[in-house]
Image (tube, helix red, strand yellow):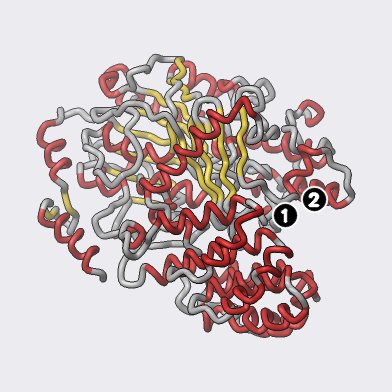
Amino acid sequence: MGSDRSLSRRRFLRNSVVLAGGGFLSPSLRRAGAGQSAERPNILWITCEDTGPELGCYGDSYAETPNLDAFAAKAMRYRVAWSTAPVCAPARTTIVSGVYPPSTGAEHMRSEVEMPDFMRMYPQFLREAGYYCTNNSKEDYNLTKPGKVWDDSSRNGHWKNRAEGQPFFAIFNTTVSHESQLRKRPHTLKHDMTKAPLPAYHPDTPEVRHDWAQYYDKVTEMDAIAGKQLKELEDAGLMDDTIIFFYGDHGSGMPRSKRWPYNSGLHVPLIVYVPEKFKHLAPKEYKPGGVSNRLVGFIDLAPTLLSLVGIEPPAWMQGHAAMGQYETEPQPYLFGFRGRMDERYDMVRSVRNRRYIYIRNYMPHLIYGQYLAYMFQTPTTQVWKRLHDEDKLNTAQRRFWERKPPEELYDLQNDPDEVNNLVKSPAHQVVLNELREALRKHTLRIRDVGFLSEAQMHSRAAGTTIYEMGHDPEKYPLEKILAMADLASSMKSRSTGDLREGLKDGDDAVRYWAAMGLLMRGRRAVRRARQDLRTALKDDSPTVRIIAARALGEHGSRADLELALPVLKELAPPDKNGAYVSMLDLNAIDALGEKAAPLMETIKTMPQKDPSAVGRANGYVSRLVKNLVETNG
């Protein structure tokens, strides 16, 4: 354990008292417990999966959601709420920690990284304050739990099981609207698919219409379940004692919503009910049946929850309490991100204000619709890709299968489907620069570690946590790395010389982005930098070696390819190089297509497991191997 981490732990322990069972009570918790009234609110969270604001109470006339519509009529609806991440595990990770996953290193799907010792998950705060905390039942965090988090996290978890007179915090999560369910066949549609609203980026085919109609069917089923959960609370006589939140965990499970940090992937319904006796804890703008224009994100849920029960949110939480004793002023922006999605790497950051969304694509050489085994099970994905290959899509529909621009800007008021990129619009340069700068300040403020490859994150954090490494300027000189990443992904044509110089930098993250910049620019840049990239094939960093090999293999000469293939062959086996190096390497091999044929025998026969890997990393290695073998024979 690193000295900085140990110091943080000692400081926390020095300022805390030990509870029975080995927990810790912070000074703010002690103050809350000593001074609060005998009556505290119960808190119920009703959540659902893969559901955007496609509800009647959000103005969707195709939706059939009578229970949630009735609930919204006596609660308050947030007009703009963001899940922060457009996919489940990092979204839940944001909620449970109150810290942005790009700050903890937990942005990548099911990565399971450690939290610093001084951090805890929000249920631990509540349990220490006397709350009975249940989760029914999905966890799916990208952070390893720091000790006992829940009183009961299972299908049996329920507020009914608390001690008499004990306040509760309970989550009930509904999975019926999950991506896997909207494509499940056979299914008899209840919604008329001929009337299904289609976004401009989806082709109008029977398969797409069926998927959208089935999605709305599943949302209706979810609504019925939510209605039963609300009725159960009412029948128990607890409505007047309970603050209730309803929200979806990210946008719909349809392709280009789930997994993409557009508004379509991040915008979720959020409805909050505060009973009369706890109106002093309600947001300033609260009124039954009302609408809040405050921008809120999942990053704000943990501090809001602590604020509701009288706990001052710790300074390390990066969100802002939207209600309760410690309510803060509204923030002007919401931030989103995209990291590795299952087996495919990508890096996207986004920010929005009330009207516009800005998206920064740090890997513009990758298409939006990279092959993901799980996503391609959806009929819409399959037919969409087939029509692209047959050249039967219009401009808006075709873009998903093309390389990304470095930057995107959309007017959500006039272009809710986010298809008209305004980056080059003279009339929008002021807002473009505003959101660029907001994202830059955010990146530096949270110490975004996503500018390291996943393998680099773990190697640099040896002996400490990724979060603590990222907050150490000596271990992670973010400003310098960010400058090279910005240059590399800008796609500016006259930057080859600076990228070649970057390959000589003493920091391997700078070298990584320099190699990426040459890869992104293609044949001309790679051939100009041939000798520099050949030298990089012997770099101390496996990450740099892989990107240099990919650049030479994709865009170099036959002689360059012959030098690159042995490097990719050496770094492919996860048992020797680790799962994260292997995943990056196998993605590079996949990008070479038929050029990688000499490596197929190695790919077929090599071990597919890293014995030290956590979570599902080995499963993603296997998916990549399976796709390579099926594609290349």
Tell me the residue at 81%/42% (across/down). Answer: 207
Q: Where does residue 98 sit, x and y in percent of width and height?
A: 35, 45
Tell me the residue at 11%/51% (across/down). Answer: 15
- Indicate whether 377 appears above or below 255: below
Spatial CA distance of label 2 from label 1 is 9 Å
**Quarter of the image where the C terminus is located:** bottom right
Q: Is residue 359 left or right of residue 524?
A: left
Q: Is residue 429 left or right of residue 604?
A: left
At label 2, counting other C-alpha atoms closer than 10 Å, the crowd grade (few under 14, some 14-19, many 20 or more) is some
- Disc sitting over residue 376 in the figure: 1
**Quarter of the image where the N terminus is located:** bottom left
Q: Is residue 576 left or right of residue 125?
A: right
Q: Amino acid at mark 1?
A: Phe
Q: Where does residue 362 sit, x and y in percent of width and height?
A: 57, 52
Q: Earlier in the sequence, mark 2 or mark 1?
A: 1
Task: Looking at the picture, tell me which residue is in the foreground, 420 or 243.
Answer: 420
Q: Where does residue 542 sit, x and y in percent of width and height?
A: 53, 76
At label 1, counting other C-alpha atoms closer than 10 Å, the crowd grade (few under 14, some 14-19, many 20 or more) is some
